[in-house]
Each structure stands twice: as C-alpha cells, then as structure tokens.
C-alpha cells in the first residue's frame, strides 16, 4: 500500500506501508520528521497530527472524541481534515492515500 506524504513546502514523499500498521508508523519508518509520535501511538501526545487530503477523508473515517480532544492539545493548527496519524489504520482501501504534514510540532 503506498502513502504519499506532502510536506508543508509542497515536496512529496511516497512510502510503502503494510496493511494493519498505522499511518504514523509509516511516517516514522520512513524518516518523516514532522510526525514525532512521542507516545508511540497510544493517543496521548498529539505530535502525530496530520491532515488527510480532502479526497480521502471519506475513506479514513471520522476522528473519535478522544482524538478530537488530543488535537486541541497539539501545537499544529486544527483543521477539519486533522487526524492523529497513529489512529489511521493502513488498509488496501487506502492505497495511494495522501497525507499533508504540518510544518513542525512537538
Ligand atoms: Fe501520540 Fe499519535 S503517536 S497521539
């Protein structure tokens, strides 16, 4: 499954991720520095904040209430497409997913 990360300056990086892992994991495995993921995926740090491309928000689903609360604690601006990348599970349906990155966080 490929995921395309778009940096704040517009440059893109395409990575491969296995179904069942998370978008956060894919970012960490591939040196995407904007995704810090301090808590390692337990939804308690908000340094894995990312923006799902609008064409994909239907497929990545809704954020949960806890996720919503955590986003408010994060440093990056919260947008309607904001998600915690550790809460997006990679699946075949997300092949080609486009994720926009905040400038910096954490
Ligand atoms: Fe900490 Fe996602 S990795 S909230």
Image (spheres, rainbow, N blue to C red):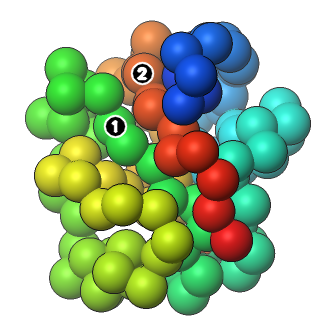
Image location (x, y in percent) of residue 46: 53, 74
Q: Residues within 10 Å of mark 2 (few under 14, many from 20)?
A: many
**Image quarter of residue 59:** top left
Q: Which mark is residue 41?
A: none
Instruction: Locate ligand 1 by image quadrant.
Output: bottom right
- Badge 2 marks a residue whose secondary structure is strand
Disc 2 and disc 1 in contact, CB within 8 angstroms:
yes
Closer-to-camera residue (37/75): 75
Of callouts 2 and 1, which one flags the residue occurring earlier in the amino acid sequence? Answer: 1
Q: Which mark is residue 97?
A: 2
Quarter of the C terminus within the rendering: bottom right
Residue shown at 20% from the left, 36% from the top: 57
User: Under 8 Å from ligand 1: the CB of mark 1?
Assistant: no
Image location (x, y in percent) of residue 54: 20, 27
Left or right: residue 41 versus residue 75 is right
- Badge 1 marks a residue whose secondary structure is strand
Residue shown at 16% from the left, 52% from the top: 80
Res. 41 visible in picture:
yes
**Image quarter of residue 86:** bottom right
Q: Which mark is residue 52?
A: 1
Left or right: residue 100 versus residue 8 is left
Closer-to-camera residue (59/70): 70
Left or right: residue 74 versus residue 32 is left
């Amino acid at each position: 499954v490929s995921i395309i990360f778009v940096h704040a300056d517009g440059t893109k990086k395409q990575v491969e991720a296995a179904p069942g892992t998370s978008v956060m994991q894919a970012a960490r495995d591939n040196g995407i520095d904007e995704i810090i993921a301090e808590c390692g995926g337990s939804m308690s740090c908000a340094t894995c904040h990312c923006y799902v491309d609008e064409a994909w928000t239907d497929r990545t689903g809704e954020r949960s209430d806890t996720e919503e609360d955590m986003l408010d604690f994060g440093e990056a601006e919260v947008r309607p497409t904001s998600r915690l990348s550790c809460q997006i599970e990679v699946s075949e349906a997300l092949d080609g997913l486009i994720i926009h990155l905040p400038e910096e966080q954490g």
